[in-house]
Image: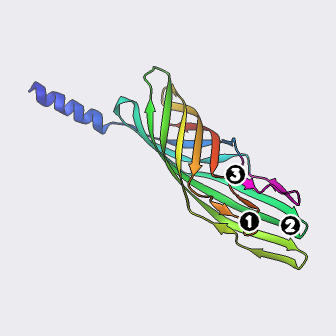
Amino acid sequence: MRPMLLLLLGAASAAAQPLAYGVKGGVPLTDFFSAVQSQSFSFSANAKRFIVGPTIELRLPFGLGIELDALYRHLNFSGSASAGSETVTGSQFEFPLLAKYRFPAKIVRPFVDAGFAFSTLSGLTQTVAAKTGLSSAPATSNFAKGFVMGGGLDISLKILHISPEIRYTHWGSASFTDPLALVSGSQNQAEFLVGITF
């Protein structure tokens, strides 16, 4: 009878593992764009200084967890050269899937996470003002995959968890390629993020 009771309690505990959900937001610590160094080309990036999106995490025993985010940012750049100027605008959607480990503690638990991310650009438009006139065309957008690692703190306030984090992503390829080959998406990305989950 006792082994059966222990088995039932263990099964109930496993089934009751919490599924946390909430929102994650923050700011980039690096530029989204990487420009070619040239004395004849001037470049200005204007990536919106915020990142935001929903987050969900399956909290497992022994401090482990699996997290999935859907992060959004709006961005644009403008460049000019002797032949004319160009502007590119668009939105980036990034989907990190991470394995997480929380170190043992009562209220403030340090954590590390690592995994993979997928990124795509939407609404990408290029406007070129050259000596021959004004034109508008889509720039080249690539589906990018990358490796993610990070670390931070999980601050538990009863049912609310606040999780500041520094996260680094290395993309296998640039998610954006300028047709004029002057600017591309940076393959190294660092962010400061804060998650609020229930």
Q: Earlier along the polypeptide chain: callout 1 or callout 2?
A: 2
Quadrant of residue 102 within the rendered picture? top left
Q: CA distance from mark 1 to mark 2?
A: 13 Å
Task: Return the residue at label 3.
Answer: 32
* Local SS, label 1: loop
Q: Residues within 10 Å of mark 3 (few under 14, many from 20)?
A: many
Q: Residues within 10 Å of mark 1 (few under 14, many from 20)?
A: few
- 94 left or right of 39? left
Please tell me whether residue 120 is drawn above or below residue 109 in the rendered image. below
Q: CA distance from mark 2 to mark 3?
A: 20 Å
SS at mark 3 in the image:
loop
Spot occupied by residue 94 in the image (x, y as percentages of width and height): 57, 53
Specify which label sits upstream in the sequence, 3 or 1. Answer: 3
Q: Amino acid at mark 3?
A: Phe
Q: Which label was assigned to residue 181?
A: 1
Q: Give the residue at mark 2.
A: 85
Instruction: Identify the residue at horizontal 58%, vertical 34% (top origin).
Output: 165
Q: Secondary structure at mark 2?
A: strand
Residue at x 75%, y 58% (from the top left corner): 76
Task: Look at label 2 and name its amino acid.
Answer: Ser
Looking at the rendered image, the disc whose residue lies closer to the viewer, 3 or 1, is 1
